[in-house]
Image: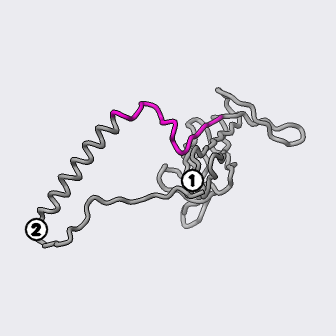
Amino acid sequence: MTPVNSRTVSFFARPAAFHPLDYSSYYVSYKRFIKFMLSSSLCFLVMTPAQASPRDPLKMSLTASKVVVDKQGKAHYIPVNTAKVGTVIQYKATFSNTLHTAIQNTTVTLPIPTNTEFTGEVYPPSAQASVDYYNYRDLPLMRMVDGQLVEVPKSEYKSLRWDIKYIPPRKAVNVAFNTIVH
């Protein structure tokens, strides 16, 4: 199977006989580019359904489960829609590859829900975290306070992301993290 790769296409190729003051060929290319974009945009708007396409290469499903630990210390997961303060909830996202080819080098990001606090438990453990939704670092997050390197409180974490190297054709991968309801 051949992996999915990204491609770059440029509409602004330099003309063969380029003169620094001759912009006419660029103008023709620009007009052609605008014409192409307008026609393809209108076609795209007409042909695009309001919902996600059934041909999306990566589909996600998200579940929320209450984490219950039995007397032997084994965790059990009970699906929930609501939870009381102090309840540990695991959010699990399943990303399914709908293609007949592998998906490589993709990044998935999940926000930590408001009124919850990240516990520090993630799967897989390669997750990175952010306190601002933009800058991600390996766990645990650290910062300088009065010249000392200290751990950022988990209550300040806003989102988590995972770099997934490979999703086989027609297979799925899971990512998960635990929170405590406030």
Instruction: Check contact, mark 2 vs mark 1: CB within 8 A.
Output: no
Q: As rendered, which of 139 and 173 lies closer to the eye?
A: 173
**Among the two numbered marks 2 and 1 on one chain, the one whose residue lies closer to the N terminus:** 2
Q: Is residue 101 above or below residue 148?
A: above
Location of residue 82 in the rendering, given as x and y in whole percent from the top left corner: 65, 26
Kindly identify which residue carries mark 2. Answer: 22
Residue 157 visible in the current orientation: no
Q: Quadrant of residue 8?
A: bottom left
Q: Residues within 10 Å of mark 1 (few under 14, many from 20)?
A: many
Question: Where residue 96 sits: x, y (%)?
Answer: 61, 43
For residue 135, the mark is none
Residue 151 lies left or right of residue 6; in this view the side is: right
Residue at the spot x=51%, y=41% of the render? Answer: 56
Q: Is residue 146 left or right of residue 66?
A: left
CA distance separating discs 2 and 1:
44 Å
The stretch in magenta equals 46-63
Determine which residue is flagged by label 1. 103
162 to 20, vertically: above or below: above
Element type where label 1 sits in the image = strand
Residue, far right = 72
Location of the N terminus by quadrant is: bottom right
Q: Amino acid at mark 2?
A: Asp
